[in-house]
Image (cartoon, grey):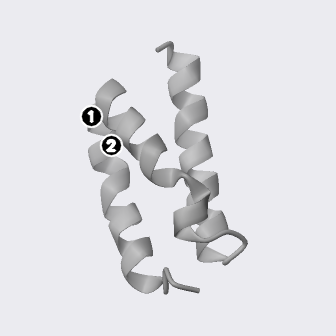
Amino acid sequence: MTERELIKLEATIRKKMDDIKSQRVSLKNSGIGGLMNTLKKVDEALYEKLMPDYKKMVAERNIFK
């Protein structure tokens, strides 16, 4: 994966996290889990950087709405 694709993946993940926080899309329907798994395979350091924000978002949001 090129650097440009990695930046785009990070931006997509952050956008989906914002969408989930604002309840435009549910956690289940967002597909963010697959993107996070892809990120872990490609760049584990960036994955570790995003994971605390992801966990915080999941804990704060009611995923069943």
**Residue at coordinates 36% horizontally, 41% vertically from top-left?**
37
**Residue that label 2 marks:** 47
The answer to whether 12 appears left or right of 61 in the picture is right
Regarding mark 2 in the picture, which secondary structure is present there?
helix
Q: Residue furthest right?
A: 24
On screen, residue 5 above or below 28: above
The answer to whether 2 appears left or right of 55 in the picture is right
Residues under numbered marks 1 and 2 in contact, where contact means CB atoms less than 8 Å apart: yes
The answer to whether 9 appears left or right of 19 in the picture is left
**Residue at coordinates 53% horizontally, 68% vertically from top-left?**
27
Residue 28 pos. (x, y %): 52, 65
**Residue at coordinates 67% horizontally, 69% vertically from top-left?**
25
On screen, residue 5 above or below 45: above
Q: CA distance from mark 1 to mark 2?
A: 5 Å
**Residue type, label 2:** Tyr
Q: Quadrant of residue 46?
A: top left
**Mark 2 surroundings: few (<14), some (14-19) or many (≥20) residues within 10 A:** some
The answer to whether 15 appears left or right of 36 in the picture is right
**Residue that label 1 marks:** 44
Residue 30 pos. (x, y %): 60, 58
**Residue at coordinates 41% horizontally, 45% vertically from top-left?**
36
Of 65 and 44, nearer the camera is 65
**Mark 1 surroundings: few (<14), some (14-19) or many (≥20) residues within 10 A:** some
The dot on residue 62 is none
Regarding mark 1 in the picture, which secondary structure is present there?
helix
Residue 1 pos. (x, y %): 46, 14
**Residue type, label 1:** Glu
Q: Quadrant of residue 65?
A: bottom right
Q: How many marks?
A: 2
